[in-house]
Amino acid sequence: MRTVTVGVLGSGTVGQDVLNLIKRRESVFTDLGVRIEIVGVLVRDVNKERNVPEGTRVTTDPSFLQECGVVIEAMGGVDRPLEMLLPYLRSGRPVITANKALLAERWDVLREYALAGSLYYEASVMAGTPVIGPMSTVLRASTFTRLQAVLNGTCLYILTQMEGGKSYADALAEAQALGYAETPPTLDVGGFDTAHKLAVLARFCADGNFPYSAVQVRGIEDVNQQDIADARAAGEQIKLVAELERDGDGWKATVAPQRLPENHPLCTAGSGRNALVYEGEECGTLIFAGGGAGGMITASAMVGDLLDWVIGFPGHVPLH
């Protein structure tokens, strides 16, 4: 039996669910001849009550990273995790993350490690709904032409509530009360979370060095009840749509509210579900839909990445 030492950065909802799912799927790792040992979990407050497996070592000291064969990053943010992960990546060891902001905004630093197969990040877009895996493997055989996607659950929830008659302000307040939106909610409703995800996707199907700064972003803050009513009268719905398509010799990436026909796949995927329509010359039109947020949904993709690494599959390699 081979022992794999794992460190986890962060113990919020996702971090806790990652730890519990690793424990729950212990038999799967055993069947692969592997025993997972959690060396340490980095937290801000060791006294905070957590739902983690008994005996989990929580600490404010990140020195345990030196003992780890693989690190799972679930702390969020950009500069702090990058500072902690870079020495680890430079040593040739792998990182599993769901941090789309880090991937989008610090790609100039991270790309060489992604090219080396050391970065695993299926959970960074659509959480547990697998889209990065297919894009980085089998879909490379097809000539990519366009994608459209709904990638932010907070905006999806707010716009759905507005369709039910609520004002933007009331729908946003309800989303915040339910924990769907942060305070302030700009990252979500301003379209920046969606833009982070679109930049990550663009590197698999358009340009392996696609910059986050090239994404044109407009959020849903100005959508009002009249807009909703006008769309409904035309048999349409308003969604915050991420879109990537050809623009001359390059690519145009936008995030903005769009009116879509009610029978469009992004409208019929179901309430609260992320959806993506991928178009390629050879593969035709493909539709991905499923949960795009939530602790255990995200953890399922992160633990799946851990299984991939254990088996020997490389991380998610961009175009190059």
Image (cartoon, rainbow, N blue to C red):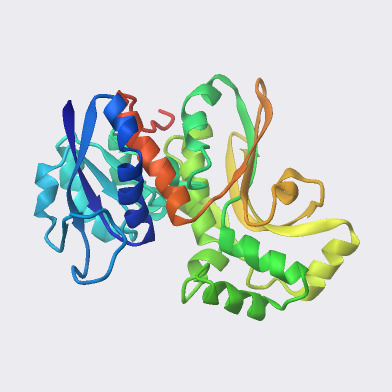
x and y, in percent, of residue 235 in the image: 88, 56
Image quadrant in which the C terminus is located: top left
Q: Image check: 87 left or right of 311?
A: left
Q: Image check: 6 left or right of 281?
A: left
- For this rendering, which residue is in front, 84 or 211? 84
- For this rendering, which residue is in front, 59 or 205? 59
Residue at 53% x, 67% y is 180
Q: Is residue 202 above or below residue 170?
A: above
Q: Is residue 116 visible?
A: no
Q: Is residue 152 above or below residue 278?
A: below
x and y, in percent, of residue 247 in the image: 63, 39
Image quadrant in which the N terminus is located: top left
Residue at 53% x, 33% y is 205
Which corner quadrant of the image does residue 223 belong to?
bottom right
Q: Is residue 248 visible?
A: yes
Residue farthest to the right, as pictured: 233
Which corner quadrant of the image does residue 152 belong to?
bottom right
Badge count: 0
Residue at 28% x, 36% y is 113
x and y, in percent, of residue 138 in the image: 52, 22
Residue at 47% x, 53% y is 196
Q: Image check: 54 left or right of 100?
A: left
Q: Is residue 167 above or below residue 41?
A: below
x and y, in percent, of residue 178 in the image: 54, 72
